[in-house]
Amino acid sequence: MPASRFLLLSSLPFLVLLSACQTGNLATVATSVCASGQQWQGGTDGSDVMQPGTSCINCHGQGEGPQFLVAGTVYAGQHESDLCGGVSGVKVDILDKDGNIALSATSNSAGNFFISQGHTLPKPYTARITYKGATRDMKTPQYSGDCANCHTKVGASDAPGRIAVP
Ligand code: HEC
Ligand code: HEC
């Protein structure tokens, strides 16, 4: 059909623009695949919703993308797979050794949160997440702001798995 063909062709330049640096590329998938029903399918296209669950700082530290002090993803459950979208609107607080809030971020539509370089990460720090009035604390002091290094699908370095909402 000529009409639909024209539509397809004329939308191509917009698709290219979108994939450059946008909050796109979260595809709808079965909730048996990702509890959120959303999965990142944009590869390394730069976006604030890119590659949820993965070690953001590890990859960005190799010279590409913005440099983050703290970054990670919050999920509904502890054992979600890499690239699954997480939970939005979760407040993530970084606390200093006296328990004062030093830094804060809020998770976006992919569950991703990040704080740029230029701030100072208290060392060691602890963390607290707050969602719908309920909190969950990481009491063990940590030194790395790359949360997903430990909060993997199965958990590494004694972490129980993902950072999961209370
Ligand atoms: C495998 C490597 C890799 C991983 C993992 C990764 N990124 Fe990226 N990121 C990139 C690259 C490469 C760019 C720059 C792409 C560009 O300039 O188009 C980028 C760019 C970005 C940008 C800038 C987008 C813009 O508008 O310019 C943000 C924000 C971002 N990433 C957030 C994250 C977050 C949050 C995570 C973890 C949940 C993450 N990234 C994980 C490779 C990665
Ligand atoms: C070096 C490994 C490591 C890093 C990095 C790390 N964590 Fe943790 N996290 C753990 C361990 C181990 C636990 C379980 C013990 C505890 O709760 O203190 C944990 C537990 C948690 C919990 C509580 C989980 C629960 O089920 O109650 C939250 C919330 C949390 N971490 C958030 C974060 C955030 C946010 C970051 C990044 C700013 C982060 N973590 C970085 C290892 C880590």
Image (tube, helix red, strand yellow):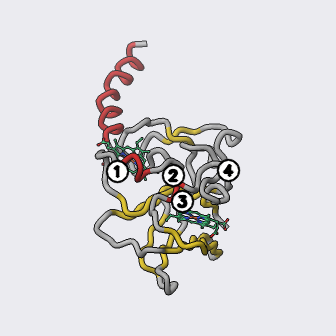
Which disc number belongs to residue 88?
Answer: 3
Which numbered disc covers residue 110?
2
Q: CA distance from mark 3 to mark 4?
A: 17 Å
Amino acid type for the residue under numbered disc 4: His
Question: How far from the left and from the top, in percent, is residue 105?
Answer: 44, 68
Residue positioned 50% across, 54% down in the render = 109
Of labels 3 and 4, the one closer to you? 4
For the residues marked 2 and 3, what is the alpha-carbon distance in whole angstroms?
Answer: 6 Å
Q: SS for tag 1?
A: loop
Dot 2: few (<14), some (14–19), or many (≥20) neighbours within 10 Å? many
Q: Nearer the viewer, mark 4 or mark 2?
A: 4
- The answer to which of marks 3 and 1 sits earlier in the sequence is 1
Q: Amino acid at mark 3?
A: Ser
Nearer the camera: disc 1 or disc 4: 1
Q: Position of residue 48 (x, y in %)?
A: 40, 51
Dot label at residue 61:
1
* Residue that carries the numbered disc 4 in the rendered image: 79
Taking depth in this image into account, of 17 and 44 the one nearest to the observer is 44
CB atoms at circles 3 and 1 under 8 Å apart?
A: no
Query: Which residue extends farthest front?
Result: 157
Q: Judge: label 2 CB < 8 Å from ligand 1.
A: yes
The span from disc 3 to disc 1 (Cα, nearest Å) is 25 Å
Question: CB of mark 2 within 8 Å of CB of mark 3?
Answer: yes
Question: Could you tell whether 41 is left or right of 119 in the image?
Answer: right
Q: Nearer the viewer, mark 3 or mark 1?
A: 1
Report the quarter where the C terminus lies. Answer: bottom right
